[in-house]
Amino acid sequence: MIKRQIAIVGGGPAGLMAAETLSRKGHAVTVYDAMPTVARKFLLAGKSGLNITHAEDYTRFVIRFGAANDWLRSALDLMTPEDIRIWAAELGTETFVGTSGRVFPKAMKASPLLRAWLKRLEAQGIRILTRHRWTGFAGRALTFETPDGPAQIEPDATLFALGGASWPRLGSDAAWVALLRGQGVAIRDLLPANCGFDCDFSAMFDARFSGTPVKSVKATSTAGTTQGEFVISRGGIEGSLIYAHAAALRDALIDTGQAALSLDLAPGREQARLALDLERQDAKASFATRLKKATGLDGVKAALLREVDPDANRLPADALASLIKTLPLRVTRPRPIAEAISSAGGVTLDAAFHAEGAARHICRWRDARLGSPDRRLSADCVFCHRQGGGKRHQRLARRQLSGIQKTQFHIGYFFRPGLRNSTVVLATGKPNLVTSAVFSTVPSSRKTILS
């Protein structure tokens, strides 16, 4: 195998995992990160215990990725939640399963795991250069701002692991979006994911209950029904139960301008029994007393009921019971992306992961700029025999294609306009470990696949 000089831009978990995988395959790897230290968001996640995976039944786990379920399945199969726990154990971090099914380090923090990981990467010969901010391209070279001033490098391959746009102060500032769009890469706008939402709460409710947890509730949206708890934040809601429905609520707001989460405030009670118990209450008693005696609701749950429907105290027993079981909590907008746990959007699936779709984009560019397909074979048109072309071109393309098919880890590629070389997706090793590590630049005179 030919040893390649590989640059990885971005020192988060995806970049570090890609570096480890490529280094084990014998390549010389250098990680470049704009921040003074790597994996800053990883460390921040450790402040709440570092939920690294989930222990639920695997058949259920693999269908939690929405539109990505089908194409992501093969990657998940190569690195299951149990494999993640084994990986952590190899680094000296034992894990446990919480009551929610989430998996955490027993130390309930990220720093011991990260220190051990960085030590292992160093032992493998991986170089990590911090305070190196990628600023774009200069021909085939990458340009950086470094502590010693502007610099250029020209590795054999480049892998970008640049993150999204949440928590930009930790490094993921989405500056790469403009740089790659400028190279013709199709990118969907970044949106908040795993985020809180604003609600039109009254000033009185907001002042009294901000920061209060709402425990033991079920929430239903188009994403399904889940049980858990959330927190009343300043002017809205947040917490793990809300994050489970964040994508559905966000997309509904985008599509229709409105969204609501249906809350079951008494998940352990049948609606008919609630109605019966409410009917039995003394009509002369206060609403708060009747509600607490019949349903057990008081405090923030009772206040939330009145906040959503100020006339709840006037409802007949059956209508009130229905409201308790299906309370429509309307949200007005997601919290800003800078506050979100993660981001949605980014490089489109066709541009990054589906080779044929990417190849069609490349071929259109080539036909417009470089002339006929017979003019020259390079890595950017390795699949375009599917689109036609001269016999010699097709024969050479098939030769390269046969080499690609021998590796299960090739995903796709795109072309960088202005250069006669392709930018190829590098997916060596276990691809779900490099989910945000998308691109690899390979000059046309070299192989299209690194193995």
Image: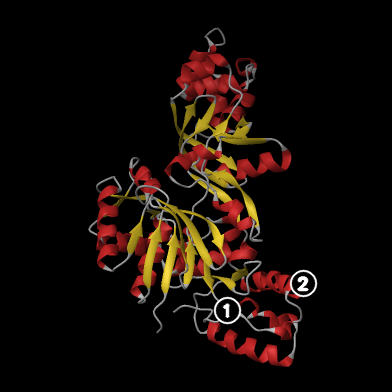
The residue wearing badge 1 is 444
**Image location (x, y in percent) of residue 449:** 51, 78
Residue 167 visible to an observer of this rendering: no
**Which of 151 and 270 lies nearest the eye of the viewer?**
151
Looking at this view, name the residue that lies furthest to the left: 92
In the image, taking residue 57 as reference, residue 106 lies left or right, namely: left
The residue wearing badge 2 is 368
**Image location (x, y in percent) of residue 111:** 28, 48
Looking at this view, name the residue that lies furthest to the top: 284
In the image, taking residue 393 as reference, residue 327 lies left or right, namely: left
When asked about the image quadrant of residue 320, the answer is top right
When asked about the image quadrant of residue 379, the answer is bottom right
Q: Residues within 10 Å of mark 1 (few under 14, many from 20)?
A: some
Residue 138 visible to an observer of this rendering: yes
In the image, taking residue 123 as reference, residue 370 lies left or right, namely: right
**Image quadrant for the N terminus?**
bottom left
Residue under the image location 52 percent in, 9 percent down: 285
**Image quadrant for the C terminus?**
bottom left
